Image (cartoon, rainbow, N blue to C red):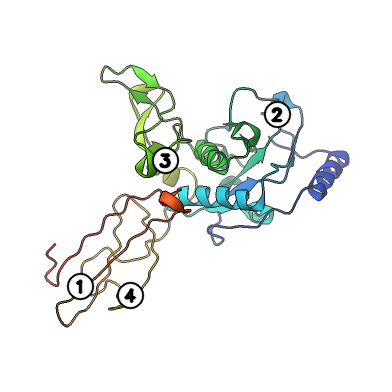
Amino acid sequence: MKNFTTTLLALVVCLLSTAAFAVPKLNSLPTASSTIYLDFDGHMVTSSLWNGGMPIACAASGMTDAQITEVFNRVSEDFRPFNVNITTDSTKFLSAPLTQRIRVIVTPTSSWKTGVGGISYIGSFTWGDDTPAFVFCDRLGPNNPKFVAECCSHEGGHTVGLSHQSRYDEACNLTETYNTGTGTGETSWAPIMGNSYSRNMTGWNDGPTPYGCANTQDNLSIITSTNGFGYRADDYSDSLNNSAQNPGNSSFSVNGLISTSTDRDVFRFNFQQNTNIHIDANPYNLGTGNSGSNLDIKIMLYDQNKVL
């Protein structure tokens, strides 16, 4: 459905790209075939599905390298459990299979679509025609990295098959089409497919959609079953036995990934006498107050008899 047209338009794209700044080339999982491309440097769109079929000359985002990197890190963390590459590198996008890729254009060119921070088609990740999604950074701050990242993940979520997550009261009356979540500060949370701009923690939810309080949507199962990719391979054993990794018995540091709601990473330590230990478990974050964290970590300590 999306066709790049004529030599003249191709020349315009080249000129736009030449004028744009060099976007840092970042990849969250470069070995993955499935790809979500965050396009910050402008793009000429010709698609029968957007703007009434009229071309859209999308300007570059105007975001700085630091802002782009923050957006990338936030979106990458949202999609971290999955075998999909979040990238700012167009060559990674173009080398991905047609039916396992999406371009998310971050642009201030928004006048053609009023009243929204971004827009995309549900399921377009697998369409195979390079129909893009859009994030309108001029309406998100403007260029607020947190807001832009939330919108990128939200629109990316639509492309991999998700509808909005809503909120209902006890009588099943719709109270929020976009669920704004709960809490304040560091531990505040909202679903990515709701309205997560003002919450610190965000996540893929199993909850109701705008189509009825009983019409629930399990984000994780949809993402991993309908797009040609699943979860990343488990990185550490889940079992309380001698096969659990021993990262060291005195001082150590280890990174891990909690990929599913039932995943556990088990480590063992060998001490020859009673001793005091100090363990810090830090979720991936972008700084003060665990900004950008998505994981609420729980630590459990067992003895050699597997007694908690």
Number of the label disc, if any, that sits on residue 264: none
Residue 257 rendering spot, x and y as whole percentages: 39, 59
Residue hosting label 4: 247
Observer-nearest of 50 and 86: 86
Tag 1 or tag 4, which sits nearer the N-term?
4
Residue hosting label 1: 276
Image quadrant occupied by the C terminus = bottom left
Nearer to us: label 2 or label 1: 1
Q: Amino acid at mark 4?
A: Pro
Among all residues in the image, which is located at the extreme bottom?
272
Q: Amino acid at mark 3?
A: Ile
| 289 relative to 22 in the view: left or right | left
Tag 4 or tag 3, which sits nearer the N-term?
3
Tag 4 or tag 2, which sits nearer the N-term?
2
Q: Is residue 276 above or below residue 74?
A: below
Residue 49 rendering spot, x and y as whole percentages: 66, 28
Nearer to us: label 3 or label 1: 1
Gap in Å between the C-alphas at discs 4 and 1?
Answer: 17 Å
Residue hosting label 3: 222
Q: Quadrant of residue 200?
A: top left
Q: Amino acid at mark 2?
A: Ser
Tag 1 or tag 3, which sits nearer the N-term?
3
